Image (spheres, helix red, strand yellow):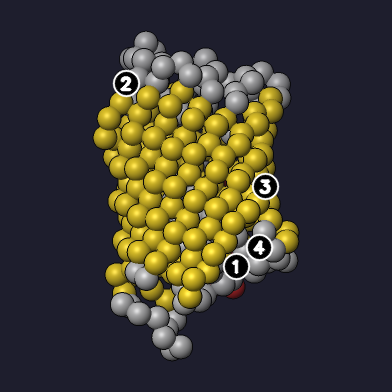
Amino acid sequence: MKTLLCLCIAGCVVVLCVGRAVGQEAMYTAAATMPPPGSVVFRPQLMFSRYGADPDGPSTRTDYTAVDLGVQIGLARAWSLSVNAPVEYQQSQRPSGDTNRVEVEDVDLMLKYRFYMDNSGGIDTARAAVTFGTRLERVEGFSVDPHVGVVLTKVQGRNGINAEASYLLTTSGREETIREGDGTADLVRTNVSYVFRLWPAEFTSTSTGGWYATAELNGMWETNGDREVRWAPGLMYEGREVSFEVMMQLPVWHELGERAELDWSVGVGLRLLF
């Protein structure tokens, strides 16, 4: 497993050296932005999460690590295609002994269509987009889980706000899981993020990048009754060559009966444009 993670991280570093960055969205909340037609954004992320005991299961603690390899392709002026494939490692502590699992959990395909854009001047903009796609999952064979959503983005001066809502229709799923959306229930996500540019106060013709503070509220509502809200503070650098992000996710409120609660989570990521 250590070898697998080292290879994935090394690949990210190689791409970092040759790519150019684009994107202005927080780690867990989407934005109504997309790369120009013919361009490709590569967005690798490394995440680690710790979960508590299962409500009705044998696990007393579970550590979850994922290397998520994401690609977004600009198809046309208002269209993009995204592909995400996470490589996941899960270690659960049980009275009978630890268990480990490594696999490519699923592949997600998503189209985004921006149906509204108003660039009022400078970097100020208001945009809205719809998303629709499917998650291809290997559960007792093969399952297709469609999803649909809407994303709103508003940037004015040093302030940016993103809001999104999505619905995932689960056609299969696992009976035992620690992560939202991986079980047999459908999942509704509601995310809101606030992005504030720390530096520079104003962009000029000589500006090469900027530092941003981010804050998110991430809501997860499953049809089995599990509900959860998390807070995610973070820091992001966006430049002409490279974008870098580091985030943390903490529980705010939850009512969980089918899966374990999150204790804490951290993540780092890159965004590069080809």
Quadrant showing the C terminus: bottom right
C-alpha span from label 4 to label 3: 14 Å
| Amino acid type, mark 3 | Leu
> Would you name the residue on which mark 2 appears?
255
Q: Which residue is at a point 39% across and 61% down the rendered structure image?
A: 160
Question: Is residue 119 found left or right of 163 in the rendered image?
Answer: right
Q: Is residue 77 visible?
A: yes
Q: Which one is earlier in the sequence, the residue at label 4 or at label 3?
A: 4
Label 2: which secondary element: strand
Camera-near label (4 vs 3) is 3
N-term mark: 1 or 2: 2
Q: 113 and 62: which one is in front? A: 113
Residue ID for mark 1: 273
Q: Residues within 10 Å of mark 4 (few under 14, many from 20)?
A: many
Residue 87, given in percent of the width and then of the height, sits at 56, 41
Q: Residue at x 60, y 46 (%)?
A: 130
Q: Residue 111, labelled with which disc?
A: 3
Which is nearer the N-term, disc 4 or disc 2? 4
| CA gap, disc 1 and disc 3 | 18 Å
Q: Which is more N-terminal, label 3 or label 1?
A: 3
The answer to whether mark 3 and mark 2 are in CB contact below 8 A is no
Dots 4 and 1: beta carbons under 8 Å?
A: yes
* Among the two numbered marks 4 and 1 on one chain, the one whose residue lies closer to the N terminus: 4
